[in-house]
Image: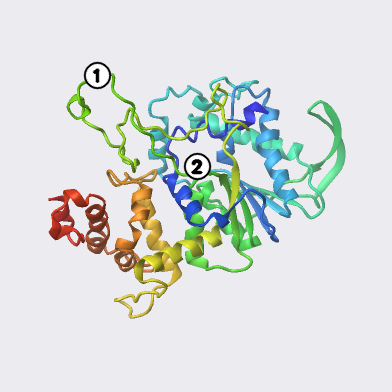
């Protein structure tokens, strides 16, 4: 249905994660890790980020029941069909979310007129036309989550051996082996008999805060996982999971996300004025723009839904990302950049660096392109950073290994200074061509 294709409306317009070009770069580095079809494997659990599904809320949905059916029930059933005996639906538990989360909430709401909604109010009987502006109101969002948690078990039909876990304020389990007698239920215009699922509190699982970190504990508990979440933060969290736990046959993680490629350089439009561009106005560089276009001319490949320019098929294609393969790819890139295929020695320990050292330091580099909580390096984006990795990968490894504190001085002079000295070689004194001192490079 048309409204089911709006899940990128909110996400593509508001910064929610790491820079999206990292996924595109990694796809170019290892296309085998990205698969349109569900990979064949024995899965122990499927996980859905319920907060990302909330972003699909749209005023054209005919009812709240339709919202729950198409945005929650449907993906849950698909994970069961893929062979997952257990599916976990995760939401943020605001009682345990860190206080600094408010910064991102304010950042996302900036420039929008958030609709007024009081915690004492009930949800309207219909979905508001400006639903996304209502979702920016936390009281409204919590009401929607409560509604989903209430309606979903009434609609879901579980077979014997199947379980649904709802991880919100606490973890509630519904099992196909624990149902009451069947009762008639009319839904979607047709009659069907659905057994009433009995909720059970899982006391062994303590409440957790943000939904995007919850999937890791279910991999520990149940094994390999299909994770339905398009937020780029999941890529970083999964990589850090492997830094901690290592790669095992029964802890594979496949993340379902948008498949995309790097934006192409777009030539700037010719000015209607005969005055030279350099004199007419200063060129403003975007922090995330590797090509340095003028801000007014810079364009990105964006899928627009519900418009005349809508992409054929209704939106970007999705794919499953093999995080184990991505982990190995990143570590291999680090070794090749540092000293070929030979793992360099950690000068502090006298032992060779490990794969987790390589991936951990690479993650730090990715964060330098900007996150929800940090500004990006100016004038360089992910592509420039990644293309220059061989110039400073050895210093990067030495400055940010897995189980040691960041060596800020080495990172600044051996990584960032080398990056800028190489990217802006024509503007740097020859004595600083190899970096080595951030002050000289900037001076």
Question: Toward which corner of the image does residue 306 lie, by quadrant?
Answer: top right
Residue 195: percent from left, percent from top:
83, 42
Judging from the image, what secondary structure is the residue with disc 2 in?
A: loop
Judging from the image, what secondary structure is the residue with disc 1 in?
A: loop
Q: Determine whether, in the image, residue 189 is placed left or right of residue 354.
A: right
Residue drawn at point x = 29 percent, y = 76 percent = 347
Residue drawn at point x = 16 percent, y = 52 percent = 428
Up/down of 347 relative to 391, above or below: below
Residue 435: percent from left, percent from top:
20, 59
Residue drawn at point x = 54 percent, y = 47 percent = 211
Q: Label 1 to label 2, Cα distance in Å?
A: 54 Å
The residue beneath circle 1 is 273
Question: Toward which corner of the image does residue 401 lie, by quadrant?
Answer: bottom left
Task: Residue lying at the far bottom in this picture: please name it.
Answer: 350
Question: Toward which corner of the image does residue 155 lie, by quadrant?
Answer: top right
Residue drawn at point x = 34 percent, y = 29 percent = 297
The answer to which of marks 1 and 2 sits earlier in the sequence is 2
Q: Determine whether, in the image, residue 311 is placed left or right of residue 281.
A: right
Residue 55: percent from left, percent from top:
55, 34
The residue beneath circle 2 is 94
The count of marks equals 2
Disc 2 crowd, CA 10 A, few/some/many (<14, 14-19, 20+): some
Of 234 and 30, nearer the camera is 30
Of 47 and 103, nearer the camera is 47
Q: Quadrant of the N terminus?
A: top right
| Applied colour scheme | rainbow
């Amino acid at each position: 249905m048309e409204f089911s294709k709006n899940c990128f409306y909110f996400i593509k317009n508001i910064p929610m994660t790491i820079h999206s070009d990292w996924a595109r770069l990694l796809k170019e580095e290892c296309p085998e890790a990205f698969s349109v079809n569900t990979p064949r494997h024995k899965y122990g659990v499927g996980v859905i980020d319920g907060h990302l599904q909330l972003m699909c809320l749209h005023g054209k949905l005919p009812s709240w029941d339709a919202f729950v059916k198409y945005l929650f029930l449907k993906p849950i059933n698909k994970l069961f069909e893929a062979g997952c005996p257990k599916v976990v639906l995760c939401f943020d538990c605001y009682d345990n979310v860190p206080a600094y989360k408010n910064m991102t909430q304010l950042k996302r709401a900036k420039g929008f007129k958030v609709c007024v909604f009081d915690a004492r109010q009930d949800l309207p009987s219909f979905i508001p036309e400006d639903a996304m502006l209502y979702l920016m109101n936390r009281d409204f969002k919590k009401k929607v989550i409560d509604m989903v948690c209430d309606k979903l078990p009434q609609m879901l039909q579980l077979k014997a051996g199947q379980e649904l876990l709802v991880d919100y304020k606490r973890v509630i389990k519904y099992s196909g082996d624990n149902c009451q007698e069947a009762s008639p239920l009319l839904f979607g215009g047709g009659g069907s008999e659905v057994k009433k699922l009995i909720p059970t509190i899982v006391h062994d699982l303590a409440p957790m805060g943000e939904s995007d970190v919850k999937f890791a504990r279910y991999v520990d508990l149940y094994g390999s996982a299909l994770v339905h979440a398009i937020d780029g933060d999941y890529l970083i969290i999964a990589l850090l999971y492997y830094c901690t736990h290592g790669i095992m046959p029964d802890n594979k993680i496949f993340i379902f996300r948008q498949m995309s490629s790097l934006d192409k350089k777009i030539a700037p439009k010719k000015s209607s004025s005969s005055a030279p561009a350099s004199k007419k106005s200063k060129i403003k560089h975007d922090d995330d723009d590797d090509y340095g276009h003028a801000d007014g001319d810079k364009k990105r490949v964006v899928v627009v839904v519900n418009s005349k320019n809508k992409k054929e098929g209704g939106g970007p294609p999705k794919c499953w990302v093999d995080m184990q393969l991505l982990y190995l790819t990143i570590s291999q890139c680090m070794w090749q950049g540092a000293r070929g295929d030979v793992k360099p020695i950690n000068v502090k320990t006298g032992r060779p660096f490990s794969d987790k050292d390589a991936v951990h330091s690479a993650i730090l580099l990715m964060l330098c392109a900007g996150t929800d909580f940090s500004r990006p390096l100016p004038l360089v984006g992910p592509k420039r950073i990644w293309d220059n990795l061989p110039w400073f990968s050895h210093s990067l490894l030495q400055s940010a290994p897995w189980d040691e504190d960041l060596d800020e001085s080495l990172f600044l002079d051996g990584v960032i200074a080398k990056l800028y000295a190489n990217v802006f070689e024509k503007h740097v004194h020859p004595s600083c061509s190899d970096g080595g001192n951030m002050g000289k490079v900037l001076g």
